[in-house]
Amino acid sequence: MAALLRGLRAGRALRGLSSVVAAPTATNPQCGSLRRGFRCAGLRLQDESKSDKPPSSTSSSTTYHEHYQARSAEQDTVASASDPAADQSTDPNTSYQDQSGEQDEEYETEEQLQARILTAALEFVPLHGWSMEAIAAGAESLGLSSASTGMFEKGSGDLVLHFIAQCNAQLTEILAEQHNQVQLGQAEPKKTADFIRDAVETRLRMYIPYIETWPQAMSLLLLPHNIPDSLKHLSTLMDDIWYYAGDRSTDMNWYTKRAALTGIYNTTELVMIQDSSPDYQDTWAFLDNRIQDVVNMATTAKQVQSTGEAVVQGLMGAAVTLKNLTGLNQRR
Amino acid sequence: MVHRMLRVDHAGEYGANRIYAGQMAVLGRSKTGPFIQEMWDQEKKHLEKFNEILAENRVRPTALLPFWNIAGFVLGASSALLGKEGAMACTVAVEESITEHYNSQIRTLMEKDPERYTELLQVIKEFRDDEMEHHDTGLAHDAENVPGYWLLKNAIQLGCKAAIYVSQRI
């Protein structure tokens, strides 16, 4: 078994070499692809300008055992898509490849490839909407075949989820940077309400380039097979915002705060997609009001609690007084 | 995996706090009051420590906290209503469960990666030793004299196992 794999690896290395040699002579790679899994069939168009780049990268040298590795990598697709900053090349560690140390810098995992295609596809969203056409256009703009859209099982939901993960990562970076600034004393810490307001505004502004098609994206996220992932992204986003806002609670407040923020965020998003005021002023005003509502509710809750405590104390005092008056408190 | 462990540990210390609060509510003014108070104070320190750890590691606390709040207090109060022996029997049962639970966590962490978790291991070991002390205190104060000791002890331990299972996940 191990010998078979070594043979395969050697074969792949040779194929890689031969494709490097073959590229300048414009050999049709399609015949080579027949030997590889269907997954790789549509992956490389011959492109003169690309022949200078070492073609052993990306997809052209995928063999069937890499296909298995890619399968396990796909389980991590969402995880890595939601954290593009993570070290993607070490994720599919169950591969035999790892043991031979054959993962050089030019090797690309399937998730990285998917991420590249989806990022490229975002440019075509204003034109084609959140659809497979956009993904196909994105793939073609990278010099890959539009048949590579077959990689995306959830279809256009994958594109929306990728975009959301990207936005969340950007926001986390911004918040972490602000956090650092405050730690270093270079910036003043904001009040919680202001912090939340700014964080939500920053995050929603990332939708502005795609605002025409955003209702379509939101409806895609509501499809049953997309719901788990979109909820995961949403809950991570809420947790991140509260963490950087300074929340360190370890009781039910953890849940109530995040639930409140989710409500604020979702309603503001809905307001935004039908807002036609200049620079979305109405949306930000709505956001301010919602945050103010939550703040008021929290203040009222505190007041109710302290009033309740005062009332209880008053009642206890009254009871003791009564006992004194009726002589029940005397010890004989 | 560590998040689950921290979540259930936090829930456990929170529950233990509420149990002692229940016991104090009934037996606070009796002779055993000071002993229960002392054990309660130690549990308070444990809870504080876990609050810190949870915040540092961004662990979600269990959603069942309000339930453990009430259930713990009711358990403590009702066992105390059986008298001092009842309260001590409850303490023995709970502390035994917790000790066993901490021991299995220590084993898991040691198997996984002792160097990475040294601080956490130290904390858990220290808390386990405290809980064993509480267990011994309970035995020393006539826990076994309560009528139906075996039944009571096993019922409480079964409840603890269920609580641990559920708090890891929810």
Image (cartoon, coloured by chain):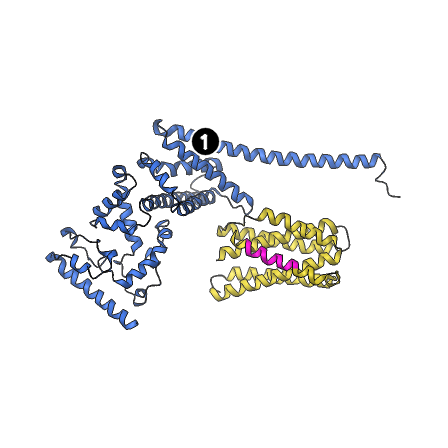
Q: Chain of mark 1?
A: A
Q: x, y percentage for residue A215?
A: 35, 36
Q: Is most of the magenta stretch helix, strand or loop?
A: helix
- Judge whether residue A222 can be spotted in this image: yes
Direction from residue B88 to residue A304 in the image, left or right: left
Residue range (magenta): B155-166
The residue wearing badge 1 is A288
Residue closest to the eye, A84 or A124 = A124
Does the magenta-highlighted stretch encompass residue B164? yes
Residue A312 in the magenta stretch? The answer is no
Q: Which chain is yellow?
A: B
In the image, residue A296 lies at what x, y percent? 54, 32
Residue type marked 1: Asp
- What tint does the image give chain A? blue
Q: Where residue B150 sits in the image (x, y, percent)?
A: 69, 63
Q: Residue furthest right?
A: A332
Label 1 crowd bin: few (<14), some (14–19), many (20+), radius 10 Å = some
Q: Residue at x 69, y 50 (%)?
A: B22
Res. A85 visible in picture: no
Q: Position of residue A258 (x, y in %)?
A: 49, 42
